[in-house]
Amino acid sequence: AEGGNGGEKPRSYSPLFKHGSSKSLVGTTSIRKQGGRSMAVVPLLSLRLGSTGLIDLGGGLLAQQIHGTDPLDQIVTIDCGGVVFRTCRRTLHKHPGTLLHGMVQPGGELHTETSVFIDRDNRYFASILDYYRTGELEEPRHIIINGAYQHGAWIRELAFYKIEDPAMIIPTEEELDLRQQALGKPASKGIRQKIWSLWEDPSSSRAARYLMLISVFLSVFAVCAFVLETQPAIRHRDPTYTVFTFDGGGIQRILNTFETVVIVFFTIELLSRFLATSKKKAFLLSPLNWMDAITVLPFYVGLTLVGSSSSESVQSNTTFVRVLKIGRLSRILGLAFKLGKYSNGVRVLARTMKTCMAELSILAVLLVMAVIIISSGIYFCESTYDVDYEGGENPSEFVSISRSMYFSMISVTTIGYGDMSPRTSCGEMVACIAGLSGIFVLGLPISIIGVKFEERYREMTKQMFIQLELDKLIHVQKKLDAFQGMGEIASALLGTGQSFRGDLSEGDLQKLNKRAQEIFLKVDTDGSGEISLEELSSAVSELGMDVEDDVLEVMMNVVDVDGSNSISAYEFSVFLQKAVTGELVQMCKDYIKNKGKG
């Protein structure tokens, strides 16, 4: 049963249901407010069906005889959405603060009764109950809603049972500092730690964020500059080609200057990061740092070779020219990979490839087998075509198995350029087999990789959410540290004419509660008996207080004791009392601290 009756107290009743000649005795039903909604909690005692005997739903006397007299060992039954689950009270005593833990506490539905009904989706409850048994919370990803998996439904169930997802626990500043030290951040404060944070932690300061944006900007435009350099008019310095009064030679000089600036910037970045890190061996072994080195080293190698060689020898030395071309190719590859470091999609793809090595190895083996078999077959079918059909003229393109591998790879991967094609019936049949084999060789492993990619992407979105929440809480913490003068509202509420210090007297409490009721009724425009965050903001404005939305949201969470995401008249009165006495700011700081600890 769902619904709500505002802030009314829980009520109970004891209905008796009849079913033929059998009777089902249903005990006290409690209507409990949970998450802004009402939940029907029905303690079930037992059920007798005709002469078939007693079905002991609650464990009752039979459970006590088996498990002894210890109340914690008594079996309790939880009927979740029509599916019955059984466990011991001792199991539910774990994880204080959660819904099921509260049920087995004094005053809870399962403290004296042995059965309860919860009107929720039972497909998620098995994972919820396993969390109490094992201490590990695993998301049931096999549940499909409206043709797709819905992560939001799992989040709503966790919120209902008052369970915090371990993946969503926001680390404290100390834990975050330890993680960064594991990545190479110097433990002691000083210039090296500041340099490390400047280059490695964009969230550490505004300068670090700007530096990251500059790095992204230079990476993007360096790639664009490299592409523009290959234009024939710019490469050959065509004087007739002009852009904004710059001819081909002028554009080339501008691009070369910009390239030099980019290389110098990335060189400073690479050296600064190396000198600042406390884990230099790990730094040197990191593939990402090697990509950064590939970005800048070819530039200096080219300068060295050009400076040590004369112009005639440079132009006549084909090997030297090829080395320079390879260097420039390496630089563009380094820039591309460097740009990929700032892309969430690229990072997810890299993690997917790392976790899918088994699947990728299967794909590689199957692909090699298919290419070798198809290459051999097409070669023996086509290699003698000119002798058998055209008297030695118009020789076949499949002159060897190695040459046929190109056709096999293109066909098995279902690309099919058409530059090579079979001319015999045997060869055409092999080509058809190549096309069909590609579906099985590539289709099955790629589907597995797609699933792994989705898992890694979900993990990445969770990490991004955690980082955003952490940044938000740190930002609110700084605002609370600078927040002063909440006690000044006493003059507006109590008419004291000065800021309030000390405890509230009985008369002050009466004045404050009366004023709180007046303001509450004024901002509660829909008459629901609850005010939302927007209405709370209006109430704060009525008091002449200037509180930003993110700080006000934390304050609301502090006084919203029932977790309904709204404030009742009583909670609003508590809000004003804590604000007048100055306790509210400290309560918010404690809330952020506990939120960080998870």
Image: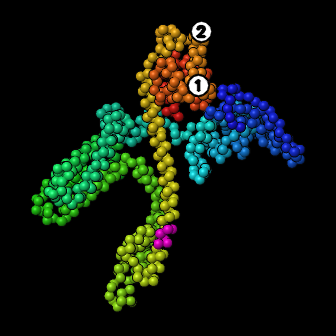
Q: Is residue 278 visible?
A: no
User: Which residue sits at x=65%, y=47%?
Assistant: 123
Mark 2 Cα shell of 10 Å, populated few (<14), some (14-19), many (≥20): few
Which residue in the structure is indicated by mark 1? Answer: 524
Q: Earlier in the sequence, mark 2 or mark 1?
A: 2
Three-letter amino acid code at the position of disc 1: Asp
Query: Is 437 included in the stretch rendered in magenta?
Result: yes
Q: Distance between the Cα atoms at labels 2 and 1?
A: 26 Å
Residue located 53% across and 29% down the image: 533
- Could you say where residue 176 lies in the image, as x and y percent from the top left? 43, 36
* Residue 507, numbered circle: 2
The mark lying in front, picked from 2 and 1, is 1
In this view of the protein, can residue 84 be seen by the observer? yes
Quarter of the picture containing the N terminus is top right
Q: Nearer the viewer, residue 545 or 168?
A: 545
In the image, 594: left or right of 409? right
Q: What's the residue at 85%, 41% (across, down)?
A: 18
Near-viewer residue (300 or 151): 151
Image location of residue 534, percent across then percent down? 52, 28
User: Could you tell whether 2 is left or right of 181 in the image?
Assistant: right
Amino acid carrying label 2: it is Gly
Measuring 60% from the left and 48% from the top, which residue is drawn there?
140
In front of the other: 207 or 389: 389
Q: Where is residue 296 drawn, in percent x and y?
A: 25, 50
Secondary structure at numbered mark 2 = helix
Q: Quadrant of residue 124?
A: top right
In magenta, the rendered stretch is 435-440
As drawn, the label of residue 108 is none
Dot 1: what SS? loop
